[in-house]
Every structure is written in structure tokens, then in C-alpha cells.
Image (cartoon, grey):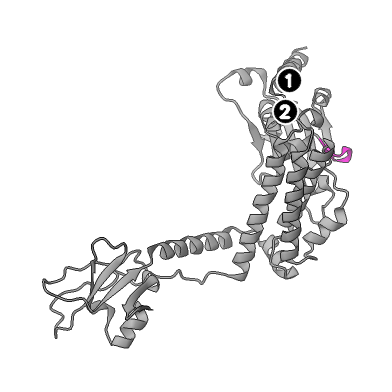
Amino acid sequence: MTIADLREQHLILFEAVSGSRAYGTNLPHSDTDLKGVFVLPEDQFFGLDYVPQVANETNDEVFYELRRFVELLLKNNPTVLELLGTPPDCIVYQHPLFARFQAPDFLSKLCRQSFAEYASAQIRKAKGLNKKINHPEPPARKAVLDFCYVTVGAGAQSVTAWLARQGYEAAQCGLAKVPHLLDIYALFVDQTPERQHGYRGLVRDPEASQDVLLSAVPKGEQPVAYLSFNRNGYSTSCRVFREYHDWVAKRNAERYENTVQHGKNYDAKNMLHVFRLLQMAGEIAATGQLHVRRPNREFLLQIRRGKFDYEDLVTRAEQLVAQVEADFATSTLPEAPDKQAAEQLLIRLRKAFYEQRAT
């Protein structure tokens, strides 16, 4: 089923322009996002192939089936709640039955989690982006030997530096596990003329190996030093390297260029939504009302244009999180929406829709 099918079969209950145009933070080049609600044909609804939502290829047009829509309303999902507060100039179509859905009937203290905690996650995401921009990973990941150290007196030295100082080659070295000690290895050096001990070196491949290499050591040989492999440090380095280059490959080029151009090293659009969500959450807690069109458009657009320092925005956002938490602690909103009432509304509306189509 496609969005075109929904239109052709007259299954749409509600359709609206969403996102920045609904918030009032759109710019001339902003995309036009569409969100909506539809009802499955009666025979398909009672069949096995329930379709919870339909979207286009770019996912900027999304329509929720009526049941899925109510399920998300009961969770106080910000995206679907915002549909109930759509400004009149953004409503493309509204079936008369859809007017039975009113935002105050669904707003609850769950909004603290769905709005404010989502915003907190966006703050963490912004911090992660800031770190990626200011601390880029090199083109190649660090190797196992970069995390290997050799005991020298009461201290330690990187194995690469130690080999150079001793005049040894990695290929003439052999490692053996030290019993009862995690990631500690006895290091042996084959100094026979033709390297008769046949040690295998420290790693199989200096660039690609993911672990140190063990060798068979002749009985009676004495280690010249002990080597420690910081396995956790190596694993963390690999994860950070992978995440960084995955981000580079998948990042939105336009948003990244905007981030670099304004020079503040944060995703401005991301931080705009942090403040939007937190402010909406505070309003919901204090007034029990949902205001999608933002009254402080200029402040939000200043964030988007990179007018504030990153540290200042994060500090403000964290203070706003604390305020929202306090607002919800004293709010008179119910703990959660009335599930039974929502279910009855769902049933009545679906029946009415099918009855109207049958006449």
C-alpha cells in the first residue's frame, strides 16, 4: 500500500504539513514534510496483513493507521501528539470524524519522558557530534601493537619504542601467556644466528591483526621482559574508529557543512529541536496545553544560524531539563492517558468510518 493508494481510495482521516513549517522555524529552502492518519479498508483490517503505517521513499511523508496512531498517542509520542496541535494553516485535509481527537484528552506526565528525555538524548547526541568534529579519527585505525607495553624497571614503554632501543626486530620475538595474569605475556627474543627457536613474532599482521600472537618456547628459555596488551583500550579504539567513519559515511552533507560554516561545532538543527521539545514539555506540564507553532521563532532560528556557543547552549539546555523535571513533579496532569477511553474512541470512530463508506 502506498500514499497514492490512500488518496485514491479516500482512506485518509487527516493530513498536515509538519516539521519546521508547522513549528514556524522553516527557512526558504526547508523541505515540506507531511504527516497524517488513515484507516485501512475494512476487509484488510480484519485480515492478516495489518499495515501500521505508510511512508514514501525518503520518509518525509508518513501516514499512521488509526490503531497505530492511537497506540502512539497513549505513549505521548511527540510526533503524533503534534498532529493534534497542527496550526490551521498547515492542515491539508481533515475528515469530520478526526475532530473527535483532542490533545488535552491525551496529554499526561508521560510527556516528561517522551519530550524531555528525548531532548536529553539529543543533547548527548550533540555532545557526540562536537567530539567527532573536534577530535576526528585518523584514516587508518590503530593497530594491536599501539596498545602493547613492555616492562622497563618499575615502569613501562611502548613495545615499538622498546624494540628500537634494544635493537630487536618484532619477527625474532615470541610471546607466552603468564598463568593467572590477564593479558600479560612473557616476551622472549631469539638471538641464535639463524633464529632456530622459530618464534612467530608479536602479531600475525601488523596492520590487520586483532590480537597478539603466541609462540612455542623451548624449555629453559628465560623471558627478557614482560608485555602487557591493553585489550580494552584496543577494543574501545576500534569502536570509536568504526563509529566515526560510519558517521562520516552517513552524515547529512548539507547539515555538516552548515555546522562547519557557523564554526560552533554543533548540529544547529539538532540543538534547535532540543530547545523546542523542552519548551513544549514545560508548557504541557504547566498548562496542559500543546502549542506546536513556536512563539520564539527568532531565538530558535538564532540557534539554527549558530549564533550561540556550544557550551552555552548545552548549559542552557541542561538547566531547562531541570526546570521541566520540576514542572512535571508538581503538574496536575494524569500519570498516563485514559487507555479505556481511547480504546472506546478508536472503536467508535472506526465503526463510523466504515459505516459511512458503506452508504
Q: Which mark is residue 341?
A: 1
Residues under labels 1 and 2: Cα distance? 9 Å
**Residue on which disc 2 sits:** 337
Range covered by the magenta-colored residues: 85-91
Identity of the residue drawn at 31% across and 62% down: 182
Badge 1: residue crowd in 10 Å (few <14, some 14–19, many ≥20): few
Residue 113: image location, x then y, percent: 68, 41
Q: Are marks 1 and 2 in contact (CB under 8 Å)?
A: yes
Of 325 and 144, which appears nearest the observer?
325
Query: Disc 2 on helix, strand or loop?
Result: loop
Residue 137: image location, x then y, percent: 53, 69
Three-letter code for the amino acid on which mark 2 is drawn:
Pro
Which quadrant does the N terminus fall into?
top right
Residue at the left extreme of this rendering? 219
Q: Which mark is residue 158?
A: none
User: Hey, which quadrant is residue 210 in on the image?
Assistant: bottom left
Question: In the image, is residue 106 part of the stretch drawn in magenta?
Answer: no
Vertical order, 185 against 4 (above or below): below
User: Hey, which quadrant is residue 285 in on the image?
Assistant: top right
User: Hey, which quadrant is residue 251 in on the image?
Assistant: bottom right
Residue 317: image location, x then y, percent: 74, 55
Vertical order, 341 against 287 (above or below): above
Image position of 27 (left or right of 260)? right
Query: Disc 1 on helix, strand or loop?
Result: helix
Image position of 225 (left or right of 195)? right
